[in-house]
Amino acid sequence: MRLFLSIIVFITFSYAAIYDDLFIDGNDAMIYENYSDAIQIYESILALGYEHPDLYYNLGNAYYRLHYIGLAIWAYHNANELAPRDLDIKHNLSIANARMVDRIDMPESMIFLKLYRDLKSYYTFIEWLTIGSIMILLQVSYYFIFRIGLLDKRINQSFINVIIIMTLCTHFIALDKYFQKSNENDGVVIANNVDAYSGPFYGENSVLFKINEGTIADIHKIQDDWVEIILIDGKKGWIPSGSIRRI
C-alpha cells in the first residue's frame, strides 16, 4: 500500500513538473512575442487535461495579439469561469468583446435579477458550496456551545435564525449555479462571416443569416460536422462544427 501511494505521489509531481515547464515555455514565448508558439504550448497543456485561470488568461492574450478575437473571448470566458473576481480577466474580456463585429447585446434585466446574477457569479460553484458548508459547521458549533450553557437562549434563537436563513440562501445559490452549469451548452464562434444554414448542409438558398467571431450561442444539436445554434435574440441555424468552440 505504501509503495502504491508513493507511485501515485511520484506520478502526480511528475505531471505537475511537466505542466510547470510547459507553462514557463509558453510564457517565455509570450515575452519574445512568439505568440503562435505560445498558443501551441498553452493548447498542449489544455490537451493534457490541465486547467488554470492563468493558463486561459495567457492563452487569450496570445490569441488577441494575433487578432483571433473569437478564440481570445473563448479563452477569457474560461478564465473568468475559474476566477470570477479577477479584474484583469474581466478587463481583457471587455476589450475583446468591444472588438466584436455585429455584437448582440443582452436585454436589460430587472434590477433585482441583475443583482442576484452578479452575486451568483461572484463565487464559483465550489466556493458557494464551501460557504454553505461553513454555515452548517457554524450552526453545529453554535448549538453545541448553547447546549453546554455558555449562551443566553434569547441570543441563541435570534442568531440561529439568521444562520439558518444564510445557510439556505447559500445552498440555494450553489444549487442554482450547479444546474445552470449542467444545462448550459454554450460555445463561442471563432470565425468571421459564418453562414448559418436552415439545415446541416450547404446551399446558397438555405443561408438564414451570418454571424461573426466572438458571438456566444447555445449549442442545441450536433449532427456529423454540423451544430445547430440558437442566438440570444432567438435566431436558430446550422453552422460547421469547426466554426464554434464550446466554453
Image: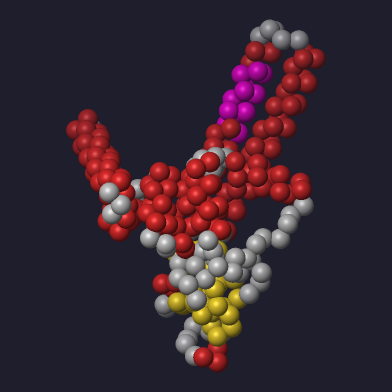
Q: Quadrant of residue 101?
A: bottom right
Instruction: Please say whether residue 133 is one of the residues in the magenta stretch.
Output: yes
Q: Is residue 147 left or right of residue 197?
A: right
User: Does residue 100 appear in this view?
Assistant: yes
User: Does residue 47 appear in this view?
Assistant: no
Query: What residue lies at 35% left-to-right and 48% top-to-bottom?
Result: 50
Relative image position of residue 51 (x, y in whole percent):
39, 47
142 vs 84, nearest the viewer: 84
79 vs 95, nearest the viewer: 95
Instruction: Please say whether residue 146 is one of the residues in the magenta stretch.
Output: no
Q: Pick the quarter of the image with the N terminus.
A: top left
Q: Residue furthest top?
A: 150
Relative image position of residue 56 (x, y in whole percent):
41, 50
Query: What residue lies at 67% left-to-right and 60% top-to-bottom?
Result: 106
Instruction: Please provide the residue range marked out in magenta.
Output: 132-143
Q: Quadrant of residue 232?
A: bottom right
Query: What residue lies at 53% left-to-right and 53% top-to-bottom?
Result: 95
11 vs 46, nearest the viewer: 46
Q: Residue furthest right?
A: 154
Relative image position of residue 4 (x, y in whole percent):
22, 36
Q: Is residue 31 left or right of residue 201?
A: left
Q: Quadrant of residue 197?
A: bottom right
Work out whether 69 lies above or below 10.
below
Query: What residue lies at 69% left-to-right and 32% top-to-bottom?
Result: 166
Work out whether 169 lies above or below 188.
above
Q: Which SS type dominates the magenta stretch?
A: helix
Colour scheme employed for the rendering of this structure:
secondary structure
